Amino acid sequence: MSEERGAERVDGADDLSVDDNAPLQLPLQLPLGTSEHTVEHGGLNRSFTVYRPSFDQLTAVVLCLHELHSNATNACRDYCAPYAAELGFVAVCPQGTPPGGE
């Protein structure tokens, strides 16, 4: 099932739990370890790196932002994945848009 939010369609919205005590439900299948993904939004292809640890019950999804002279892959590997592996959360590391938006 999907939910409409303005012009953006959100698939799997019914799969998300709002109960703070319920285990995290991911609406898409993510491989264990590090994976690269791309989505199109606003006419731009946006890439992001995801790290999924091998926990039976994941605790959260954490957005990890990199600094200006870094990139999503390095930020995920060096800063986010070690904590995600220890604490059981999914780390999502988007690649920033360069000045000019290209």
Image (cartoon, helix red, strand yellow):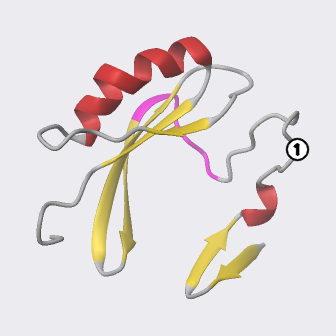
| Residue extent of the magenta highlight | 28-34
Using the image as rendered, state which of residue 2 and residue 100 is in the foreground. 100
Q: Is residue 33 magenta?
A: yes
Secondary element at tag 1: loop
The residue under the point 82% across, 49% down is 17
Is 53 colored magenta in this rendering? no
Residue 96 percent coordinates (x, y): 25, 54
Q: Quadrant of the N terminus?
A: bottom right
What residue sits right under mark 1 in the picture?
A: 19
Q: Residue at x 35, y 80 (%)?
A: 42
Q: Residue 15, percent across and down?
A: 79, 56
Does residue 16 sit above or below 25 in this rendering?
below
The answer to which of 32 and 100 lies nearer the viewer is 100
Classified by dominant secondary structure, the portion drawn in magenta counts as loop
From what the image shows, is residue 21 above or below residue 10? above
Q: Amino acid at mark 1?
A: Asp
In this picture, is 18 found above or below 40? above
Quarter residue 22 falls in: top right
Residue in the picture at 63% in, 71% down: 10
Q: Is residue 61 above or below residue 4?
A: above
Splitting the image into 4 quarters, where does residue 77 fall?
top left
Q: Is residue 33 left or right of residue 57?
A: left
Q: Quadrant of the C terminus?
A: bottom left
- Is residue 24 found left or right of 81 in the rendered image? right
